[in-house]
């Protein structure tokens, strides 16, 4: 890791410190509210996906204090290996959140476009087994990637005991395979988010045209509205970062700006606010405003 250009880094450290401090406090509050609201939730397939999403947020929030510590002191004294772990968790959080958002939205889309009897039944046990399988795969894959692939250039050029800077692994993107993987992932997330958001918005429009003022009394409308909220969270949290990343891949000198965009993706932890309208359809205000 490079020790030069400390002035620009410190400037961005103040910005990142503010972002992660706000994120940590608001994230814990939203997590607590979500646990309180969902503790009496039925164990439907969608609910299982939501529980997985909340657990993903929880794991990420556990690492935020380490980022706050680093950006407040401008010094990392916990070793390169732990730096790599903390650095990788925010990426794991982003991609796991994306996966569970897609699952939730696709389930809602299927429930609208196909009658329930035409959709193969998925047992709750199967959903739980799939969830467990995904987490086991993540817990096996991520440590391997972090150990053998992530931040290897930094590890080669630094003694693990003398590392004083962290979260500066942009040099790894210089290799052609890493560039290709990042291009593919960023493009896929941008396109998938755009398609799902469009489909979800179309469903809301169809339901509104069908029920008009009575839309607030329709459980299906409320469920689809919450799915649209998830889609919009994907747009706000993930799309700006990945659009910038397509540019950043060829301009690695913008690593500090990339870290700011990356930090903003974590604000999807606030998605738990959508669960507060669980018992009464918050679409009331939406429908009222359209009439």
Image (cartoon, rainbow, N blue to C red):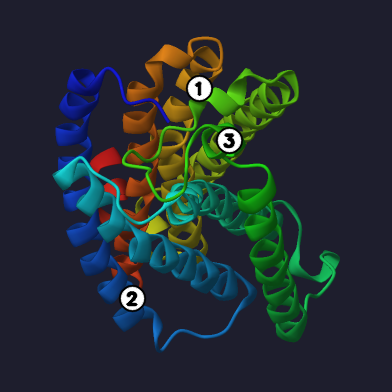
Q: Nearer the viewer, residue 121 or 160?
A: 160
At x 58%, y 35%, the residue is: 156
The percent coordinates of residue 71 (x first, y second) are 21, 43
- Mark 3 surroundings within 10 Å by alpha-carbon count, few (fewer than 14), some (14 through 19), many (20 or more): few
The secondary structure type at the circle numbered 3 is helix
Q: Earlier in the sequence, mark 1 or mark 2?
A: 1
The residue tagged 1 is: 245
At x 55%, y 43%, the residue is: 200
Q: Is residue 282 visible?
A: no
The residue tagged 3 is: 156
- In this rendering, the answer to whether 228 lies above or below 223 is above
The secondary structure type at the circle numbered 1 is helix
The residue tagged 2 is: 279
The percent coordinates of residue 146 (x first, y second) are 61, 50
The secondary structure type at the circle numbered 2 is loop
Q: Earlier in the sequence, mark 3 or mark 2?
A: 3
Distance between the Cα atoms at labels 1 and 3? Answer: 25 Å
The percent coordinates of residue 109 (x first, y second) are 65, 52
Image quarter of the N terminus: top left
């Amino acid at each position: 890791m490079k020790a030069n250009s400390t002035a620009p880094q410190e400037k961005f450290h103040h910005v990142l410190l503010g972002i992660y401090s706000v994120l940590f406090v608001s994230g814990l509050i939203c997590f607590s509210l979500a646990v309180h609201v969902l503790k009496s939730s039925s164990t439907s397939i969608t609910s299982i996906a939501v529980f997985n999403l909340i657990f993903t947020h929880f794991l990420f929030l556990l690492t935020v204090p380490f980022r706050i510590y680093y950006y407040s002191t401008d010094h990392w004294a916990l070793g390169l290996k732990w730096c790599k772990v903390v650095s990788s968790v925010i990426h794991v959080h982003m991609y796991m959140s994306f996966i569970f958002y897609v699952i939730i939205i696709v389930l809602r889309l299927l429930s609208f476009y196909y009658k329930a009897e035409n959709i193969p039944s998925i047992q709750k046990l199967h959903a739980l087994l799939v969830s467990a399988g995904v987490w086991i795969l993540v817990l096996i894959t991520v440590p391997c990637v972090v150990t053998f692939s992530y931040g290897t250039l930094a590890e080669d050029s630094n003694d693990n005991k003398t590392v004083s800077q962290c979260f500066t692994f942009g040099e790894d993107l210089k290799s052609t395979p890493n560039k290709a993987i990042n291009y593919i992932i960023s493009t896929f997330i941008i396109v998938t988010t755009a398609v799902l958001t469009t489909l979800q918005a179309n469903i809301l429009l169809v339901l509104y045209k069908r029920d008009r003022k009575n839309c607030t009394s329709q459980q299906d409308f409320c469920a689809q509205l919450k799915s649209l909220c998830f889609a919009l969270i994907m747009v706000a949290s993930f799309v700006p970062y990945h659009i910038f990343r397509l540019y950043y891949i060829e301009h690695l000198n913008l690593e500090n700006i990339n870290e700011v965009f990356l930090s903003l993706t974590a604000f999807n932890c606030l998605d738990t606010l959508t669960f507060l309208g669980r018992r009464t359809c918050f679409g009331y205000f939406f429908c009222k405003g359209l009439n």
